[in-house]
Image (cartoon, grey):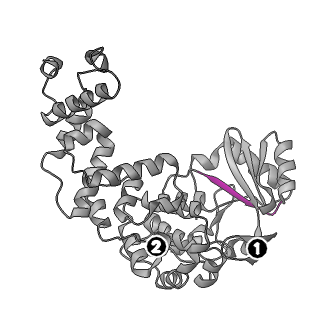
Amino acid sequence: MQVTGDWLHHSGTQGLCQALSAMGFQALFVGGCVRNALIGAPVNDIDIATDATPEMVTNIAEKAGFKVIPTGFEHGTVTVFANGIAHEVTTFRRDIETDGRRAVVRFSTDVAEDAARRDFTMNALYARADGEVVDPLGGLPDLLARRVRFVGDADARIAEDYLRILRFFRFFAWYGDQSLGLDADGLAACAAHSAGLETLSRERVGDEFRKLLSAPDPSMAVAAMAQSGVLGAALPGADARAFPIAVHFGVNDWLARLVVLGGMPESLRLSRSALAQVSLIREELGQLRSPQELGYRHGAKVAKAIILCRAALFETQPPQGWMHDVEVGAKAVFPVAAADLMPDLQGKALGDRLRALEQIWIDSDFAPTKADLLG
């Protein structure tokens, strides 16, 4: 089995591999780049595993003229920029001690040991610089069948890092065969260890929700999370009943999907902008503004998300002609400016009058002109 692609043949990528090989070290592509190349998905990141230590990688790469940044030196990782491409290069590792949040590792020279500490069999695939696949654990059949399975014992893999519970559902949403359903052993282990999610940083949990809810259709994964108790453990108060309806209606923004799940999104330590969008959508769900007004006030994208989320949660169809109305509202421009009311009005009185005229204009389907409103 071979992998190929422009990323594989890039001069910087090949140059880095050749530099390591010339000094007697292995240079194996690993993880997402191999997995995605094999199934025809886009390759966005290039990870390289090697038996060279971080110090050796740094020396070799710098002598080859590449820039090196020690992004995770103590854990065996450096980032090498070669001809404009970033490569995360990590020394083969094996776990010495784990506590469910982080691991103490020891460097290794055995690719099989490195593969054994990875999460899923489809992520334990490697490839040489020429594209030849190296499969230490026999994970290739799982990838080709779109089976998301833990490496070895699922309970042991989860106990090493409880975030793998959320990754299990996220990888199923992105790469799993929906007709096969989730791996039974993996699902049982996730349910058994769901309390461990409480030990994780909320930022890590929030990032996994972002990745999961960004999948084209994570409905089956989210339903399984709910049924297994994982959803409630990760996002207290969440309810997945309206989620598949929202996806069916076309809610594709991950933050809007998060709103549909409910619970306490604030607990996920979202960015200020993300939390502001969540708060806006949640507030508008109960306002029942018209599609035209939503389009005018928030723009077409956010207005559409609000309308579809509302319909899913209320178990109703979106209003007839709503898409056209949203677009009309998004293009509308209020014809009155503050200067038109000055100097007769100032301060609070000016603001109150502007808002009153704006609401009259909105309620009249944006038809009144400036003359109509000021006359």
Q: Quadrant of the C terminus?
A: top left
Q: Is residue 292 above or below residue 163?
A: above
Q: Which residues are magenta?
A: 45-52
Q: Along the horizontal axis of the image, is 130 left or right of 180? A: right
- Viewer-closest of 120 and 38: 120
Is residue 205 on the magenta stretch? Answer: no
- In front: label 2 or label 1: 1
Q: Residue at the location (28% across, 56% down)?
A: 309
Q: Which of the marked residues, 2 or 1, is nearer the chain's N terminus?
A: 1
* Quarter where residue 127 is shown: bottom right
Q: Residue at the location (40% across, 60% down)?
A: 258
Relative image position of residue 122 (x, y in whole percent)? 56, 70
Q: Along the horizontal axis of the image, is 72 left or right of 55? A: left
Q: Along the horizontal axis of the image, is 357 left or right of 208? A: left
Q: Does the rendering let one see residue 227?
A: yes
Per the image, the residue denoted by label 1 is 94
Q: Secondary structure at mark 1?
A: strand
Q: Is residue 295 above or below residue 192?
A: above
Relative image position of residue 26 (x, y in whole percent)? 78, 61
- Viewer-closest of 368 and 201: 368
Q: Give the crowd class for mark 2: few <14, some 14-19, many >=20 residues within 10 Å.
A: few
Q: Residue at the location (20% across, 64% down)?
A: 315
- Per the picture, the main secondary structure of the magenta-coloured stretch is strand
Relative image position of residue 73 (x, y in whole percent)? 80, 56
* Quarter where residue 77 is shown: bottom right
Q: Along the horizontal axis of the image, is 97 left or right of 193? A: right
